[in-house]
Image: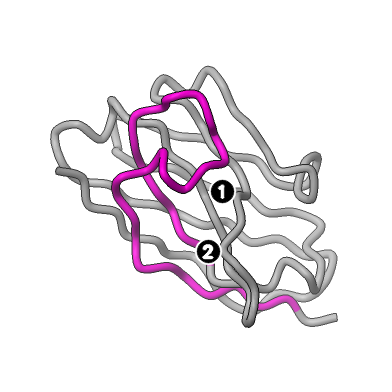
Amino acid sequence: QVQLVESGGGLAQAGGSLRLTCAGSGRTFGDNAVAWFRQAPGEEREFVAAISWSGGVTHYANSVKGRFSISRDNTRKTVWLQMNKLKHEDTAVYFCAAGAYNGDWSGEREYDYWGQGTQVTVSS
């Protein structure tokens, strides 16, 4: 079993930065790929970024490529999402999710464990 808790959300200005943290617990956290998804009001949840269990492979949505960076430290059971050059359209609730990778980084069904989410609001 893996538990996930997100933190680090808040209010930022367009062009600014935020760093989200996903704190994991459970013996198998280090065996799982971890991803960030986001959901804006009235929109479906969408994939943002993912990282393999070892941290050696990362994958990004085109909308955040070059602006966001995902990283992890399995000794601390933590995954981060560094968000730079924020845009108003990045405003959403951000969720981290963990699961065994089976070939589709961006598929919600790949991930068995989900956090409660953290709100990110970017003012234009």
Look at the picture and state if 100 lies above or below 98: above
Which residue sits at x=43%, y=53%?
A: 96
Residue 41 painted magenta: no
Q: Which residue is mark 2?
A: 94
Which residue sits at x=79%, y=50%?
A: 63
Q: Which residue is mark 1?
A: 81
- Front residue (pair 101, 19): 101
| Label pair 1/2, CB-CB below 8 angstroms | yes
Look at the picture and state if 123 lies above or below 44: below
Residue 15 placement (x, y as % from top left): 84, 65
Whether residue 124 sits left or right of residue 69 in the image: it is right
Mark 1 or 2 closer to N-term?
1
Look at the picture and state if 92 lies above or below 103: below
**Magenta highlight range:** 94-122
Q: Quadrant of residue 39?
A: bottom right
Q: Quadrant of residue 34?
A: top left
Whether residue 102 sits left or right of residue 20 in the image: it is left
Helix, strand or loop status at disc 2: strand
- The quarter of the image holding the N terminus is top left
Residue 14 placement (x, y as % from top left): 83, 71
User: In the image, what residue type sits under mark 1?
Assistant: Leu
Helix, strand or loop status at disc 1: strand
Which residue sits at x=39%, y=25%?
A: 53
- Front residue (pair 68, 37): 37
Distance from the alpha carbon under mark 1 to that under mark 2: 10 Å
Residue 74 placement (x, y as % from top left): 33, 30
